[in-house]
Amino acid sequence: MSGLIYRSVIHRFLIGIPIGFLAASALLIPSVSWAQASLEVSLVDANGRQPVANLPVELNNIGTGQNAETITDQQGKARFIGLGTSGSYIVSTGETDLYEPTISKSIILRSTFDRSVTLLVFEKNNLRAQEEIVVLGRRGITRLNTKNAEVSATFSEPDLKILPIEARDVTRSLFRLPNVTQATGFFPEAPSISINGANSLFTNYMIDGLDNNENFLGGPKFPIPLGFTQSVTVLANNFSSQYGRTANGIVNITSKSGSNNFEGEAFFISRPGILVKNSNFNTTDLSGNPVSDTFNRYQGGIGMGGPLIKGRTFYYANVEYTRDEKENRLVVPELGVDKAVGGTNKFLLSSLRLDHIWNDNWSSTARFNHGRISIGRQAGGIGGGVTFPSAANSQNRTSTLLALAATYTGDRITYEGQLQYSRFRWNYGAADPGPRVTVQAPSSQTIAILGHPGYVFDDTENTYQTQHKITYKYGAHTLKAGADVIVSNFSLTGGGNVAGNYSVRLNAAQLSKIFGSNKGVNLQPQDIPSNVQV
């Protein structure tokens, strides 16, 4: 077929095997496994500020009921690896002959992060230690991981709830984080953020540590909504080599999970254009296309989560729908046309996560995301255009992600394995498969654009990813080995219009005839006289 190009390529094939052998300091590399994290607890004597060795430490998950116990090493450290991100954790030590019991505040973990906490333990009958004054202060958003110098900034779920976020699109909150600015380049649908001022097309987007990139042009495949987000983290500098697919920044979202407690939300949001003051500065929709002051948005959704089997199986489900109604003006005095032309954008985002605890050693997680997005590219223009409805079209983006993860946690060995399949289709649908006709008046001024949009673009991506990591603890040392493989296959139909793109010029008689036909906004390519000048 003339003018069309078809290609099928394996876009990326990357295997990384990072192995680290850590000596007496037992410096741990953050886990890349999906929806898993680790926690290092340091016990310090409140009087002498010395590490407390050989003291039992208990970890309890308030939401899921999971618990684990270990003993501090000679450095006063206790390590918990392969932890899930569901619920929140409490660290505690029991009463001994020498020390009083102690307990931490609630700790919430995010995926692919190795968190550390320090607990002071008090000797019995040591009044001096117990009379100490403790000054507490709120930490900033930016974090420096003292284990690997990773610089990151995180919005937790409570942070996201109080922020004004346009259309509940999580990426719209990231402008408030350090090192993140609004991107301005390329095409309307290009990614909206830039990290450290770098090219926004090469930002790495992840969900629970797994790939969420549209690997042809860049940007996220599935725009995860606010209702399915537990936290969002931007890694700006010095992050681990496990994120080896980009020299740019990383956006990692930890998905929401269920617990033993039922929770849910339902919402409806409206942005009626009548309440918006007229402005000389037009805003844009979520895909970067300019909209007028008459723009309306209607958004609703529901989310719920809880236990399927208490203490064993948990779920969280979320569905959100957004409908944008926008309006352009079609203004062609030569044809007697001056009319408002409407268009719509539609977003349907569905997500489900299941977590199951098989026994004290094995746990698994499944996640499903599906998005259907339609962006209307209607006729006219913000201040008046000459594109007629016959040349209008829609842009459709469909994304599906299915991920599975399994974790084994033993006394010395921890295994984390993940498998994900994702599919993404980006199609500019044409309303009219015929020719594209640009109509000029006798003065050579363009007065109408009719028919086909003039190009074809239909991209389908299928991506397979698997990650595996083994951690082995031997005394004060930790040995880690991992492998990560991702393969993307693309099918692209693209090129020009096989029916042809034409520019025609009307004479005065032909223009008068079309004006008198009263076709108005319904003018079609076949309404142009056959003897017109091409």
Image: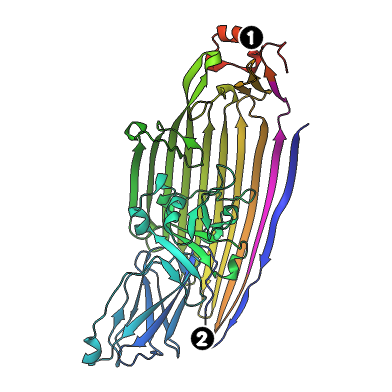
Magenta span: chief secondary structure:
strand
Q: How many other residues sit within 10 Å of disc 2, few (<14), some (14-19) or many (≥20)?
A: few
Amino acid at dot 2? Ser
Q: Can you tell which quarter of the image residue 301 is in? A: top left
Q: Which residues lie in the magenta part?
A: 483-503
- Picture coordinates of residue 423, whole percent (x, y): 61, 47
Q: How many other residues sit within 10 Å of disc 1, few (<14), some (14-19) or many (≥20)?
A: few
Mark 1 to mark 2 CA distance (whole Å): 87 Å
Tell which of 512 and 471 is nearer to you. Answer: 512
- Picture coordinates of residue 8, whole percent (x, y): 73, 46
Residue reaching furthest right?
A: 2
User: Which comes before the other along the chain, label 1 or label 2?
Assistant: 2
Residue 207 as seen in the image, left or right of residue 227: right
Q: Is residue 144 visible?
A: yes
Tell me if residue 342 comes above or below residue 345 in the rendering: above
Where does label 1 land, which residue? 508
